[in-house]
Amino acid sequence: MLIVGGARSPPLPITSHTRGKTKPLPFVQGSFTVGPATPSGFYYSWAMRNAFHEELDSIGVSLLQMAGLVKEAMIDATNALLNADLSLAEKVIAADDTIDQIQHDLDARTINLMARQQPVASDLRVLVSSLRISADLERMGDLAHHIAKQARMRYPSTAVPEELLPTIRNMGTVSNAIIDKLSVVMEHQDSVRALEIEKDDDEMDKLHRQLIATLLDDNWKHGIESAIDMTLLGRYYERCADHAVSIARRVYFQVTGEYAAPVL
């Protein structure tokens, strides 16, 4: 199929010869079988298929938009937490509504497209995966929202004790790196890098264990309330990375049609 001026040009109709006469064959392409391939029916089928792929592409664009907003929210939430920045915390809390709205809109479009076009094979995998991916991204946005609320609750004090500042800062850095790689995986459907994200999550798990060890140490002197705060914050970062792993595994399935083996 040729690409001219950014749009798909229609393929030639398929015909057969019966007793010296040309007979149009049913038009078969991708998820659709439409026939017979008369000139009007053929080009209508092509136009519908082209419109379907444009809608499919727009869903991918929305998912990337969500990933970008989630990354921004996690960066701002971490900075608000470490610097006791109330205005930044409020920005993250308010922005969560935008992420939620994009997810609701995206899911409605996806379900509508599935109902109208009844896709199969790889097209169906893309649409089903988009529902799962949008849910994971929305949850990652919620986790950034929770971190920002923690910063707001402890304002004007800093929610993080001094000895845990490096750990939380590193957890924020790892989270941002994972989301960056995840965006590349989603945009380019990169099944190789998708598998790498599960290994990247090991670094977040290591930092989470380090944080818990500090809280359980006999030298902890900041009381139960602070320990609860830090336990929750550590869990928020750790779960954010886990959702990224879930998305990466979904992209791998979307590309290959197979589930990736767990990384040991």
Image (tube, grey):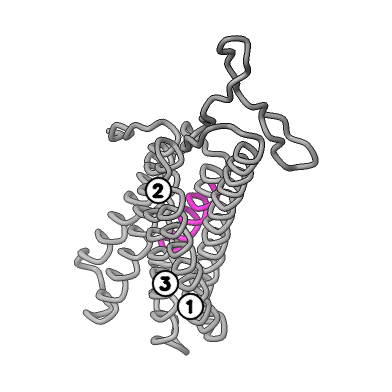
Q: Residue furthest top?
A: 19
Mark 1 highlights which residue? 97
Mark 2 highlights which residue? 129
Local crowd at mark 1 within 10 Å, few (<14), some, or many (≥20)? some
Q: Residue furthest right?
A: 5
Gap between marks 1 and 2 measured at Cα: 23 Å
Q: Is residue 170 above or below residue 21?
A: below
Q: Residue at x 29, y 78 (%)?
A: 226
| Residue 13 appears left or right of 237 | right
| Residue 3 appears left or right of 30 | right
Local crowd at mark 3 within 10 Å, few (<14), some, or many (≥20)? few
- Residue 182 in percent (x, y) is at 50, 47
Gap between marks 3 and 2 measured at Cα: 41 Å
- Checking the image for residue 162, the label placed there is 3
Sequence-wise first label, 3 or 2: 2
- Three-letter residue code for mark 1: Asp
Residue 170: say if magenta.
yes
Under tag 2, what secondary structure? helix
- Three-letter residue code for mark 3: Glu
